[in-house]
């Protein structure tokens, strides 16, 4: 598959009570009145930190994979329940941008890597989101 823009298709909520299937939409970015904070994951110290509020949007940028033909993984968030994935895109240049909505107060670690089958060192990028 080429380096075309990939998006996570999200299922929209439907208020109808009929048997029609949910509407499928592609949402890039957060659609909220709260400000969007930007977090560029890094493999260097100090770990980048951003602050937001519940309902806020976090745009997470994952660097391009150093391995040709291997995209970076969708970031993992620990612990669960702090951030909700809204959309995920990979640019033609290989930079992944993932948007999350902040759900509740606390600190979440966001991290990503590249999955390849080799003994070569694989970078791990991370950052922190503090929801206050």
Image: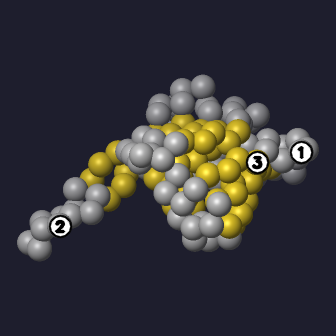
Reading the image, the residue beneath label 3 is 49
Within 10 Å of the Cα at label 3, are there few (<14), some (14-19), or many (20+) other Cα atoms?
Answer: some
Please state if 70 lies on the left or on the right of 97 as rendered.
Answer: right
Query: Disc 3 versus disc 2: distance between alpha carbons?
Result: 38 Å
Within 10 Å of the Cα at label 2, are there few (<14), some (14-19), or many (20+) other Cα atoms?
Answer: few
68, above or below 86, in the image: above
| Colour style of the rendered protein structure | secondary structure
On the question of residue 8 being in view, the answer is yes
90, above or below 88, in the image: above
Within 10 Å of the Cα at label 1, are there few (<14), some (14-19), or many (20+) other Cα atoms?
Answer: few
Query: Disc 1 versus disc 3: distance between alpha carbons?
Result: 9 Å
3, above or below 46, in the image: above
Label 3 secondary element:
strand
**Disc 1 vs disc 3: Cβ atoms closer than 8 Å?**
yes
Which quadrant: the C terminus? bottom right
* Spot occupied by residue 80 in the image (x, y as percentages of width and height): 62, 71
**Disc 3 vs disc 2: Cβ atoms closer than 8 Å?**
no
Q: Residue 57's mark?
A: none
All told, the count of numbered labels is 3
Q: Quick one: 26 or 72, which is closer to the camera?
A: 26
Reading the image, the residue beneath label 1 is 46
Please state if 48 lies on the left or on the right of 100 as rendered.
Answer: right
Going from N to C along the chain, the mark reached first, 3 or 2, is 2
Q: Residue at x 54, y 27 (%)?
A: 92
**Disc 2 vs disc 1: Cβ atoms closer than 8 Å?**
no
Q: Quick one: 71 or 129, which is closer to the camera?
A: 129
* Spot occupied by residue 84 in the image (x, y as percentages of width and height): 51, 61
Query: Disc 2 versus disc 1: distance between alpha carbons?
Result: 46 Å
Q: Residue 15's mark?
A: 2
Question: Toward which corner of the image does residue 131 lie, by quadrant?
Answer: bottom right
Going from N to C along the chain, the mark reached first, 2 or 1, is 2
* Spot occupied by residue 112 in the image (x, y as percentages of width and height): 71, 51
């Amino acid at each position: 598959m080429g380096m075309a823009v990939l998006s996570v298709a999200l299922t929209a909520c439907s208020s109808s009570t009929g048997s029609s299937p949910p509407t499928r939409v592609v949402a890039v970015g957060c659609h909220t009145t709260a400000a969007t904070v930007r977090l560029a994951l890094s493999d260097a110290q100090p770990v980048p930190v951003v602050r937001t509020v519940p309902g806020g949007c976090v745009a997470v940028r994952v660097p391009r994979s150093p391995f040709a033909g291997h995209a970076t993984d969708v970031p993992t968030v620990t612990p669960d329940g702090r951030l909700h994935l809204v959309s995920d895109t990979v640019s033609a240049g290989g930079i992944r941008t993932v948007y999350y909505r902040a759900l509740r107060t606390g600190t979440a670690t966001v991290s990503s890597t590249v999955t390849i089958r080799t003994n070569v060192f694989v970078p791990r990028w991370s950052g922190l989101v503090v929801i206050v």
